[in-house]
Amino acid sequence: MHPVASTITERLGLGFLTLFIVSLLIFSAIEFLPGDFANTTLGQSATPQTVAAFQREIGLDRPAPQRYVEWIGAALRGDFGASFSSRPGSERLVVDIIGPRLRNTVFLAVITALVAVPLALALGIAAALYRNSWFDRFVNAVTLTTISVPEFFVAYILMLLLVIKIPLFQSLSNVRPDMGVLESLPHIALPVMTLTLVIVAHMMRMTRAAIIGLLANTYIEMAQLKGLSPARIVIAHALPNAWAPIANVIAFNLAYLVVGMVIVEVVFVYPGIGRALIDAVRARDIPVVQACTLIFAATYILLNLVADIISIATNPRLLHPR
């Protein structure tokens, strides 16, 4: 087998093993949460017999290993069961609850990526072209600041500036299913800005570092001797050879973007899967919590695998083994 295919197969196997271990951790962590759905729903005045009967009704009376095997087996088929918040005779499937929320989260992530990735590449290329200039220093200072500040603080600062001081946007992202893409954009402007400021710094700095590292190579010096402009040298000669580390860091930041937007969704009351997770934790709705956390874990592992595969596939030592 070719070294690239062999290494990629090995990483895929490790990815599935990691997801299995994470699923065990998710199930175990939820088991150790204080209280349970039965006690939360029935209240303190419920008798032990009533609580036990309710636990039997929703399946919490079975041993934990049995419930884990049943849960993970059904999850592999795309079945996360019914929400504990369902009423008898009118069960709400977890898929029906988190499906619309997941679409909203993916929509927010895609729009943020479409803004953040080109912006990071443009800033990184410009900072490399004009390194050690006032522009380079200013961009580096701003990006270092955004890296150091947590997402919720960035969100509140943007709300203060662009909602209270200058009322350009709404503080609540009231996105409805009947809204079109263009109609939804003003409602998600602040969440997109917040997430962009958080993730663009890493991608911009990696782009700048990768390009500057390549500018010392001999073929770049040859291009300079030919009289090519600095912009053409960077874009036509340096950037194509810097795609491997840049694509790697983009994939890592997209992984963070998907799982790191829980705080942003809560701050802006955005109807995404992150907010659904927080609501489910408060209500001790175990099936919804398990489904949301497993989706987050699978997405993070998948995007990290993509980053690994990009690094492997662009490694000259593996592509051209001796």
Image (cartoon, grey):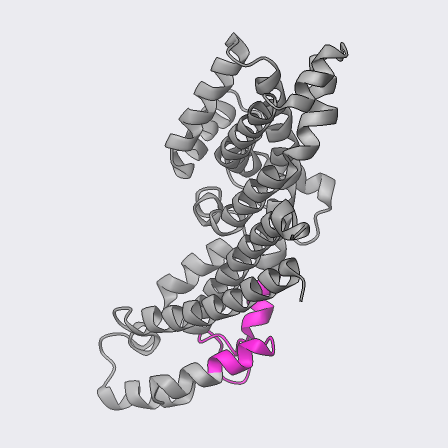
Q: Position of residue 82 (x, y in %)?
A: 51, 78
Left or right: 239 with respect to 265?
right
The span picked out in magenta is 71-99
**Magenta region includes residue 82:** yes
Foreground of the two, 87 or 139? 139
- Tell me, yes or no, if residue 56 can be seen here: yes
Seen from the viewer's position, the closer of residues 300 and 310 is 310
| Residue 181 higher or lower than 297, as above or below | above
At which x and y percent is residue 143?
47, 25
Considering the image in quadrants, where does the N terminus appear? bottom right
In the visual, does 179 lie left or right of 17? right
Q: Quadrant of residue 189?
A: top right
Q: Which residue is rendered at x = 55% and y = 58% of the image?
A: 299
**Where does the image place residue 147, in percent across and percent down from the top left?**
42, 32
User: Hey, which quadrant is residue 146 in on the image?
Assistant: top left
Q: Residue at x 67, y 27 (%)?
A: 238
* On screen, residue 156 above or below 255: above
Residue 126 place in picture, x, y as percent:
62, 18
Number of numbered discs? 0
Q: Is residue 13 left or right of residue 229?
A: left
Q: In this rendered view, identify the residue nearer to me: 163 or 111.
A: 111
Q: Report the residue at 70% width, 48% height from top.
A: 179
Q: Is residue 272 visible?
A: no
**Residue, x 60% and y 69% (percent of image)?**
96
266 inside magenta stretch: no
Q: Quadrant of residue 119?
A: top right
Q: Is residue 142 above or below residue 151?
A: above
